[in-house]
Image: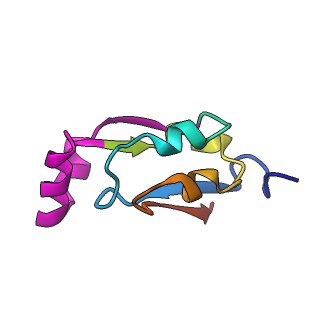
Amino acid sequence: RECRADPGAFVPVIDRGRCEGKRACVDACPYDVFEVRRIDDADFAHLGLLGKLKSVAHRRQTAYAPRADACHACGKCVAACPEQAIKLARR
């Protein structure tokens, strides 16, 4: 079986300090869990200095998982992310 869990049993957790918004997760996910957009101001405020500089260098783009309930924990996003910014966590 390709995916290991029922939808919503696991959720993707994105490290915004590492994510560069390259869309690899969007392209890899067969369940349309991710989107890449401008980082929310509150999330940007929680980044450290280096994270903020990196975010600005990448046009403040980052991944979000608005449809995390659709995640089947297949791990394709984790494998595809070039920054290793995604982990799967049990809900």
Indicate left or right for 91 with 80 as reference.
right
Comparing 2 with 88, the one in front is: 2
Q: Residue shown at 22%/44% (left/top)?
A: 58
Establish if 35 lies above or below 77: above
Q: Which residues are magenta?
A: 33-61
Magenta stretch: residue 10 in it? no
Q: Position of residue 74 (x, y in %)?
A: 71, 53
Q: How many marks?
A: 0
Residue 31 falls in image quadrant? top right
Establish if 30 lies above or below 51: above
Query: How is this picture coloured?
Result: rainbow
Q: Position of residue 57 (x, y in %)?
A: 15, 47
Q: Residue shown at 61%/41% (left/top)?
A: 29
Q: Residue furthest right?
A: 1
Indicate left or right for 22 with 1 as reference.
left
Establish if 38 lies above or below 63: above
Indicate left or right for 9 with 54 as reference.
right
Residue 83 falls in image quadrant? bottom left
Q: Residue shown at 74%/46% (left/top)?
A: 7
Q: Residue shown at 19%/43% (left/top)?
A: 41
Q: Position of residue 10 (x, y in %)?
A: 65, 57
**Which part of the image, by quadrant, shows the C terminus?**
bottom right
